[in-house]
Image (tube, helix red, strand yellow):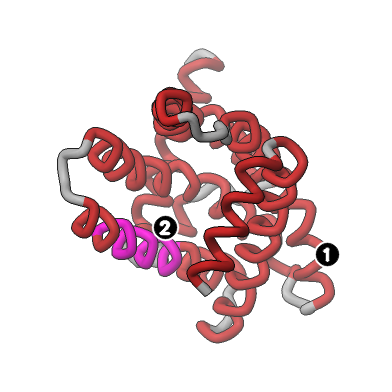
Amino acid sequence: MSEENQSENAILSSLKAVWTLARFDGRGMQMLDLSAEGFWKSFWAMAVAAPLAFLPVLIGQGMAEQAGIPSTFWPSVISYLIHLPLTAFIMIYFLRYMKLDANYAPMIIAYNWSTVIIYAISLPLSLIIVGGTIGQDVGVLVSLLIAGYIYLYRWFVFRESLRISGWLAVGVLLFQQLAMLLVDMLLLRLITPEYFEKLTQTAALSG
């Protein structure tokens, strides 16, 4: 079997595994390559998910230009490129501090590949909302449901990969999400300060 075929099979096998996890079936962890080689290969997920991630970004950029709204294209691109490596970097220190690092590598492998599934789930909704196929109220409701499922999926991945309790998995999820939110806000502040100011003003008014 050629090296290219082996790589394709590895990707398909990994996606099948995280799709099993997406159905809340813990046997998906046993289907992943949890070796040291599998750890580094899991970062291929960045390339696999890229078309799913950037299509809504490109469409959103065009709409922002037409509406005269500051574009978040570059913050989105940079956030995407650093998301998985930065998560891996941050989580190793956090898990060591929490004494949960025994299964750090399986967690990163599952987290990285599950990102592809999350973008695959989110893309159709993004295109439907952008295309105006559904009303704003329905779009908000569906977005909340999808977001709820994604958080539940992430929580399940942390619980199964780290082999920890559900409550501990909640803490790990909250830390990871808050850390990445802070990074995203920093990127907006540095690259598109106009958009950041509008965002903070809107948040202040709604509060």
What residue is rendered at 70% in x and 61% in y? 179
| Residue 60, above or below 24 | above
**Total marks placed:** 2
**Label 1 residue SS:** helix
Compute the Cα span from label 2 to label 1: 26 Å
From this viewpoint, is residue 40 visible?
Answer: no
What residue is rendered at 66% in x and 56% in y? 180
- Please provide percent x and percent y for residue 39: 66, 44
The amino acid type, in three-letter code, at marker 1 is Tyr
Q: For this rendering, which residue is in front, 143 or 70?
A: 70
The amino acid type, in three-letter code, at marker 2 is Gly
Q: For this rendering, which residue is in front, 51 or 102?
A: 51
Query: Closer to the N terminus: mark 2 or mark 1?
Result: 2
Q: Which residues are magenta?
A: 142-153
For residue 146, the mark is none
What residue is rendered at 57% in x and 47% in y? 112
Q: Which residue is mark 1?
A: 93
Residue 196 drawn in magenta: no
Left of 196 or right of it: where is 23? Answer: left
- Please provide percent x and percent y for residue 119: 42, 42
| Residue 198, above or below 191 | below
Count neighbours of disc 2 (C-alpha within 10 A) and say few if under 14, some if 14 to 19, many if 20 or more: many
Q: Which residue is mark 2?
A: 28
Q: Nearer the viewer, mark 2 or mark 1?
A: 1
What residue is rendered at 73% in x and 46% in y? 189
- Please provide percent x and percent y for residue 74: 63, 30
**Prevalent SS, magenta region:** helix
**Label 2 residue SS:** helix
Q: For this rendering, which residue is in front, 157 or 52?
A: 52
| Residue 70, above or below 157 | above
Left of 33 or right of it: where is 135? Answer: left
CB of mark 2 within 8 Å of CB of mark 1? no
